[in-house]
Amino acid sequence: MTRPDLSRASWFKSSYSGNGGSCVEVSSDFPSVAPVRDSKDPEGPALLFPVEAWRSFVAATVAGEFGDI
């Protein structure tokens, strides 16, 4: 997989990010990958997840499959 150019990505935080700065940002600008980065280090590295894997993770989180974390 070729790493996408993230320099012009638009990033957003979860609406649940009111927890004192410990949050991640994700970009939906790419059709096949979901880049995720630490909001406290926007110039740092981003992890790339296949879009379907990211959607499954978000759905499982919303469904409470990971417990009360």
Image: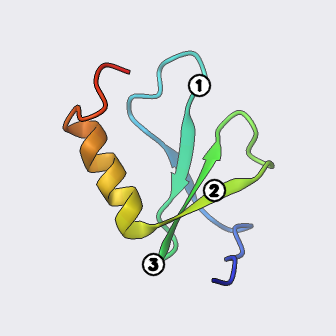
Residue 20 in percent (x, y) is at: 57, 16
User: Reading the chain from its start, which is encountered first: label 1 or label 3?
Assistant: 1
Q: CA distance from mark 2 to mark 1?
A: 16 Å
Q: Residue at x 35, y 50 (%)?
A: 57
Nearer to us in this view, 62 or 30: 62
Tell me if 60 is positioned left or right of 34 in this view.
left
Q: CA distance from mark 1 to mark 3?
A: 27 Å
Per the image, the residue denoted by label 1 is 22
Q: Report if the CB atoms under discs 1 and 3 are less than 8 Å apart.
A: no
The amino acid type, in three-letter code, at marker 3 is Pro
User: Reading the chain from its start, which is encountered first: label 2 or label 1?
Assistant: 1
The amino acid type, in three-letter code, at marker 2 is Leu
Residue 31 in percent (x, y) is at: 45, 78
Q: Residue at x 56, y 45 (%)?
A: 25
Per the image, the residue denoted by label 2 is 47
* The quarter of the displayed image where residue 62 is located: top left
Crowdedness near tag 2: few (<14), some (14–19) or many (≥20) residues, C-alpha within 10 Å: few
Nearer to us in this view, 22 or 60: 60
User: Reading the chain from its start, which is encountered first: label 3 or label 2?
Assistant: 3
